[in-house]
Every structure is written in structure tokens, then in C-alpha cells.
Image (spheres, coloured by chain):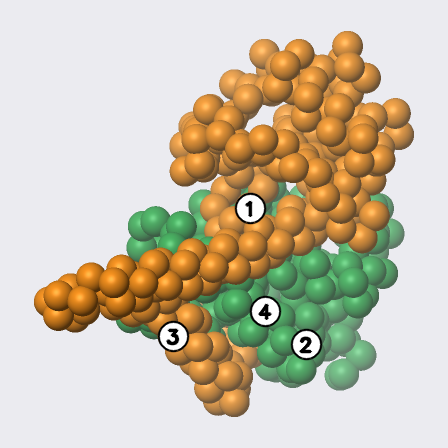
Chain colours: A orange, B green
Amino acid sequence: MNPKKETPDEPIVARDAAYYRAPGALKARIEALVDAEAAVAREPRARPRWNWSWGMGWMGPAVAAAVAGVLAWNVAMMKVAGHQDQLLAQDVTAAHVRSLMLDNHLNDVVSTDQHTVKPWFEGKIDFAPRVEELRDCGFPLAGGRLDYLDGRPVAAMTYRRRLHVVNLFEWPSRETSRDVQVSSINGYALARWSEGGLQYWAVADIAPDDIREFARCLRHG
Amino acid sequence: MNERFNRLVMPHLDAAYNLARWITRNDHDAEDVVQESFVRAMRYFDRFRGDAARPWLLAIVRNTCYTWLQKNRPSEMVAMDEPALEAQYEAQGLSRGEGNPEVVLLQGANRKLVNQALEELPVPFREIVVMREIEDLSYKEIAEIAGIPAGTVMSRLSRGRELLKHALEKRMRRAS
């Protein structure tokens, strides 16, 4: 008999499998990326020069410099924001595709009843997601699951549109409200909006008009 | 952001690489995936709350890996639903309740064989085994990272271990 009786948590793998450490070159590349990112974040804030020009009493140039600074800052922020939105749109699309490829991952709670789906999220996320049935609009509810987007756990609701699946992702937003914007990535239609402290992203391989209709129906019934 | 990111996230670069390397099974691809993951992590960092940066980062890495697999090796993503895995599992003649596996035999398993066997495990099992046994994450952390219930983590882990044992036994019999 072997004295080392295996317990469920005494693995063979941990003892023998490889731990792959990041190569030095990769580490250097990533550190350079972090520095570059930090520089981008710092630079726009250094622009408004009102600190020194204020004391010089040259209100004209001072104001001009301040305006230029603020403009530069805004443009830089808009660029950063635009880039983030684009990245997020890509991630939303990727999450949608992923949910369809992993058969068991499309729904963790399967139900066409909002009173079954909504309570499922309780205690799993730190906000109350909006769950509507939308059958009357031709988008019957199919279920829900947790997903991961924007660096945080989000609620994902799934709806059907004939043979297509619509993923609706919801998570808290700092924006108070934002109208529906429709875009498309690789043939997937996306709609995004913010309302009542939550932001919403809907995505499906349906026509842009259909995704707009989905958003309209969810918001206004 | 620089200082805080360096302090909280950078220490987990090895963990990120290890997970990516085990999922992609290739150095070059793992490097690409990790670099892309860090770009995302930086963008999302101002929304990161709390101090559990490792699971937060690994969730981003895992998602980036999956997106990469879909694009580059969709075949590995096909048979990932539970019934198909179950079928594969049954086909290998392994019943779940089979107690007292060949511990003695396995303790002689060498590193190379273990690595090969783990690499051949289907992705959904492999990633859970790696996170639990190599990365030493808790069930709860793994559940958050993989976006699956803790019960599924446990069942995949135990099935993953059995599949691994089975594969190891076969390899060792072949070797001896």
C-alpha cells in the first residue's frame, strides 16, 4: 500500500506539470506598453497652462492658451474614449460569438419567464439587471448567464429572433443616459445605450434595423 | 495609473503567461495573447475596483485566449458542450465512480508525460485543472474567471483529473 493516499485535492498535476514563466522579452514589451499608456494619460493633463500664464497678467494669451489646452485635452479624451468604445464593441462581439460556440455557456438559467431569470442574478452581481420578455416584439426571452466584459462581471440576457440569438449585456455605467447607437462589426449588428445607471449592449447576426427595433422595444415596450 | 498598475497587475504577468501558454499550447501564440490581454487590462484598469488583481487579469487573459482560439483554431472549440464531452468520456471506457485509481503508478509519472497528457486534455477541462492545480486559484475565483457556476468548476475539475489519469496510465503502459 502506498502511504500517500490521494485526497481529492492532492493533484498529480501541480507536482509535475510545467509552470511557464513569461519570457523576458515579453515582459519588456509590456512594460514599454504600460509606460506609453501612462504617458498618453499624463500628457493631455499637462496641457492647460493657466497656472503660469495666470500670474503674468496677460489675460489674452492666458485665456487662449487655456482654451487651446482644454481643446487639446478634449480631443485627446475623445480619442481615448472612441478607442475604448471600439475595443468594447469588439469585446462585446467576441463575447457573443463565444457564447454561441460554447453550447453550455449560452445560458446558465434557461427560461422564457422574466420572473425566473431576474432572481437568478441575485447575489451573483452587484446590480439588478433589467429583464423583459419582449415576446410581443418577436424577441422571446431565452435565458441569462454571467459574462465578463469591460473588466468586470456583467449580466447577459439572451433573446431569440427566429433562428438567431440576441445577446444583451448589461452593467453599471457612469453615464446617466445615452441614446441608442447602432453599429456593425464583421456582420454582427450592435446597439448600445445607457439608461437608469446601466449601460446596454445588444448584439446579434441580424439586420441593423432589427437590432434597433430590439432596443426600441426593450426601452419603450 | 502607471504606479498602481505596476504594483497590482504586473506581478501577475507569469500567471497570465502560464494560463495563456496552457490554453494555446504554444510560446509564440501565448506571447501574442498575453500582450493583447495587457492592452485590454490597461484600458479597463480605471474601472477595476478592489485588490484581487490576479483573477481580474486572468479573466481578461482567458477571454482573449478564447477569442484567439475561435479565430485561429476553431476545431478546438467545437466539441466543448457537456454532452459531447460526456460521450468522449464514455467512449474512453471510464466510469465516473471508478474508485481508487492507480495512484502508485501515477506517482512514477514523469514530468514530460504529465505535460503531454495535460496538453491533450480538451480545453474546458485543461483550463480548470491548470487554474486549480498549477495556479492554485480557489473554486470561487475560477468560477468568476471562467464565468461558470462553482459546481461546474468542481465537476469539470474532477472529470478533468480522471481524464488525465486515464491518459497518463495509457502513456505509462506504452512507455514501459
Judged left or right of residue A52, residue A158 is right
Residue A40 to residue B166: above or below: below
Residue B116 to residue A162: above or below: below
Residue A120 to residue A69: above or below: above
Point out the frontmost of discs 3 and 1. Answer: 3
Point out the frontmost of discs 3 and 2. Answer: 3
Point out the frontmost of discs 4 and 2. Answer: 4
Q: Which residue is mark 1?
A: A148
Q: Which residue is mark 4?
A: B36
Decide which of A195, A132 is in the foreground and name it: A195
Residue A98 to residue A31: above or below: above
The C terminus of chain A appears in which quarter of the rendering? top right
Q: Position of residue B58 (x, y in %)?
A: 50, 60
Judged left or right of residue B30, residue B140 is left
Q: Disc 2: which chain?
A: B
What type is the residue that disc 4 sits on? Glu
Q: Position of residue A1 (x, y in %)?
A: 53, 66
Mark with earlier residue (3, 1) = 3
Point out the frontmost of discs 4 and 3. Answer: 3
Q: Which residue is mark 2?
A: B29
Query: Share a chain, discs 2 and 1?
Result: no
Q: Disc 4: which chain?
A: B
Disc 4 crowd, CA 10 A, few/some/many (<14, 14-19, 20+)? some
Q: Position of residue B99 (x, y in %)?
A: 63, 50
Q: Look at the numbered discs 4 and 1 and tell me whether their residues touch, using CB distance below 8 Å.
A: no
Work out whether residue A5 can be spotted: no
Label disc, if present, on residue A39 of the rendered structure = 3
Mark with earlier residue (4, 2) = 2
Question: Considering the numbered disc 4 on the image, is that residue within a helix, a strand or a loop?
Answer: helix
Residue drawn at x 82%, y 60% as measured from the top left: B74
Question: Considering the numbered disc 3 on the image, is that residue within a helix, a strand or a loop?
Answer: helix
Question: Considering the numbered disc 1 on the image, is that residue within a helix, a strand or a loop?
Answer: strand
